[in-house]
Image (cartoon, rainbow, N blue to C red):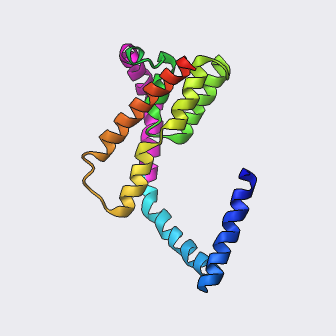
Amino acid sequence: MSAYIIPILFVALFSYCYIKKINTYDTFVKGAKKSISLVVDIFPFIATIMIAVALLRASGITAILAGLLSPVFNLLGIPAELIELVLLRPFTGAGSYGLLESVLLEYGPDSYISRCACVILGCSETIFYVATVYFSQTKVKKLLYAIPVALICALVGSIIACLLCKVI
């Protein structure tokens, strides 16, 4: 069934454009032109986030934080081996998947820790990346609640992920 979703969407889109008499090629080209300015607008924000993550990992701050936060995370039910993953996930998708790969190689794909890591990545998002892209385009400047609420939700999702992996 899932193999037919993309073709069905294309047929539906082209049918809609035909019925509404929309020139699909010209519309596509206009959208592509706008994407160039979008990339130029958001590039500094994305570069800043990626540099900050690289500096955090290279400096060892994430490892130090993982050591300091280990008792709290253990109390919450998150294994100590996954603390760095939980800390980095809001910042970087690629870095998170790199950590996932190391967890899978070290503990095996069927272990409790690996299952937790997979579910944590599946139930969370790169909060700062998404906020950077979204808020840079909407010109929203008051982020008082958006980021803290998203971080709390990511932590709660990680706790529930580990709890579900323990139960299942």
Q: Say which residue appears at 39% left-offset and 18% top-offset.
A: 76
Left or right of 122, for residue 11:
right
Q: Residue at x 53, y 41 (%)?
A: 93
Q: Is residue 23 visible?
A: no
The quadrant of the picture occupied by the C terminus is top right
Above or below for 39 versus 87: below
Q: Magenta region's main secondary structure?
A: helix
The residue furthest bottom is 21
Q: Residue at x 46, y 58 (%)?
A: 43
The image quadrant of residue 102 is top right
Would residue 57 be counted in the magenta stretch? yes
Does 106 lie within the magenta span? no
Q: Position of residue 77 (x, y in %)?
A: 44, 17
State left or right for residue 23 relative to residue 34: right
Q: Which span is picked out in magenta?
A: 46-72
For the residue pair 93 and 24, the one nearer the viewer reads as 24
Q: In the image, is 147 to the left or to the right of 11?
A: left
- Residue in view at x 38 percent, y 36 percent: 153
Camera-nearest residue between 28 and 11: 11
